[in-house]
Amino acid sequence: MEIIEIKDEFIKLGQVLKLAGWVESGADAKEVILDGEVKVNGECVLQRGKKIYHDDVVEFDGKKMKIKA
């Protein structure tokens, strides 16, 4: 599982996917999120702007990432 460190209280889901290098653009992030391909803490999420906080786990394409402060 990858660990991504953020400086702020939260980061938006679309930004997480780009930061991890899992998608190339915001448009790509929007597409995979709306297609139901992304999970946060084990639940499918369809909101690109969903706030992701410390200790949340994001899953996409068989990969997992945990957000840390």
Image (spheres, grey):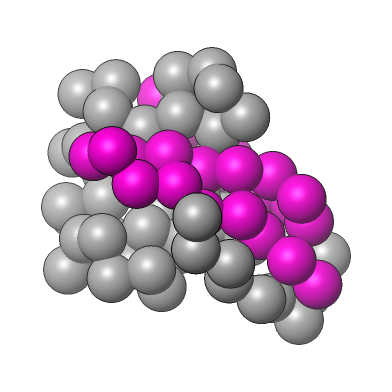
The image quadrant of residue 19 is bottom left
Which residue sits at x=17%, y=68%?
24
Q: Position of residue 13 (x, y in %)?
A: 49, 49
Question: The magenta stretch spans which residues?
Answer: 46-69
Q: Position of residue 12 (x, y in %)?
A: 56, 55
Residue with the most extreme bottom position? 7
Residue 48 appears in the picture as rendered: no
Q: Position of residue 25 (x, y in %)?
A: 20, 66
Q: Position of residue 15 (x, y in %)?
A: 45, 63
Question: Is 25 situated above or below 43?
Answer: below
Q: Is residue 55 left or right of residue 62?
A: right
The image quadrant of residue 20 is bottom left
Question: Is 3 situated above or below 45?
Answer: below
Which residue sits at x=55%, y=22%?
42
Residue 21 appears in the picture as rendered: yes
Numbered-mark total: 0
Q: Is residue 6 left or right of residue 62?
A: right
Which residue sits at x=16%, y=52%?
28
> Is 5 in front, or is 16?
5
Q: Is residue 68 left or right of residue 43?
A: right
* Residue 6 lies in the magenta stretch: no
Which residue sits at x=54%, y=18%?
43
Question: Is 13 situated above or below 10?
Answer: above
* Residue 51 lies in the magenta stretch: yes
The image quadrant of residue 8 is bottom right
Identify the image quadrant of the C terminus: bottom right
Question: Is 5 situated above or below 55?
Answer: below
